[in-house]
Amino acid sequence: MNNKRYGGYIIGGIVILLLIFFTVTYNGLVKKEELVKLQWNEVQNAYQRRIDFIPNVVNVVKGQADFEQTTLQQLTEARAKATTVNVSGKEISAEAYNQQSAAQDGLASATNRLLITVEKYPKLKGAAAFKGLQTQLEGTERRIKIARKDFNVAIADYNSSVRSFPTKVVAGIFGFKSSDGFQSDAGADKSVEIKF
């Protein structure tokens, strides 16, 4: 009789420990998944800041009467393309990220062309308004770089948890899958960055 009682206690204890393990592991995976979404939103915020900032640059440059209109038109078109590609936290995938990254790199490239063209206009280059915009644009580019890095760190931490044992068992039961995140294309290590 005592052996059955002790056996029942042992089985009950094992069940309780398993429940605690599953609960703690599940909650940890949820937190890491939410952190990935949060970091993706930070990337989106940084991209949006760049997009919102471009009209200010265009307006300051338009003040220069003989400035090349083709350059401004290309910048405006790149901005329009970048605004059409927006990936929500629920749709995070390597394909979506690369699509948005390509649109944002196009915008950065067009901005670079604008800044290179400004070199030909010393009056504009020396204007206080333009210098202020350059400083703000430089800060925006730093934010994008940091947001991308933080997103990649969050993805790596989440994937590490989803793929390691014994967490992998809980992840499989509750449908947590590793996320591809950003996978660079060949030559992406030389991504477009706005130069000053």
Image: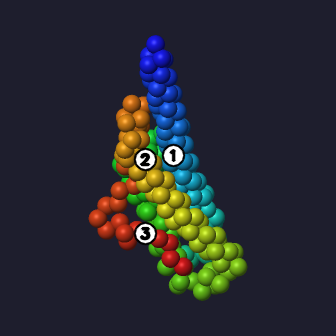
Q: Residue 120 bears which disc, if any?
A: none
Query: Label 2's element?
Result: helix
> According to the image, label 3 marks what residue?
192
> According to the image, label 2 marks what residue?
161
User: Does residue 71 appear in this view?
Assistant: no
Q: Is residue 54 above or below residue 157?
A: below
| Circle 1 or circle 3, nearest the eye | 1
Query: Label 3's element?
Result: loop
Which residue of the protein is positioned furthest toward the right in this rendering? 128
> According to the image, label 1 marks what residue?
32
| Circle 2 or circle 1, nearest the eye | 2
Front in this rendered view, residue 17 or 188: 17
The reply to whether the C-beta atoms of the residues labelled 2 and 1 are less than 8 Å apart is: yes
Q: Is residue 29 above or below residue 153?
A: above
The reply to whether the C-beta atoms of the residues labelled 1 and 3 are less than 8 Å apart is: no
Instruction: Residue 77 in the image: state x and y as whole percent.
Output: 47, 58
Q: Is residue 124 above or below residue 111?
A: below
Instruction: Residue 10 in the image: state x and y as whole percent.
Output: 46, 26
Quarter of the image where one finds residue 45: bottom right
The type of residue carrying mark 3 is Val
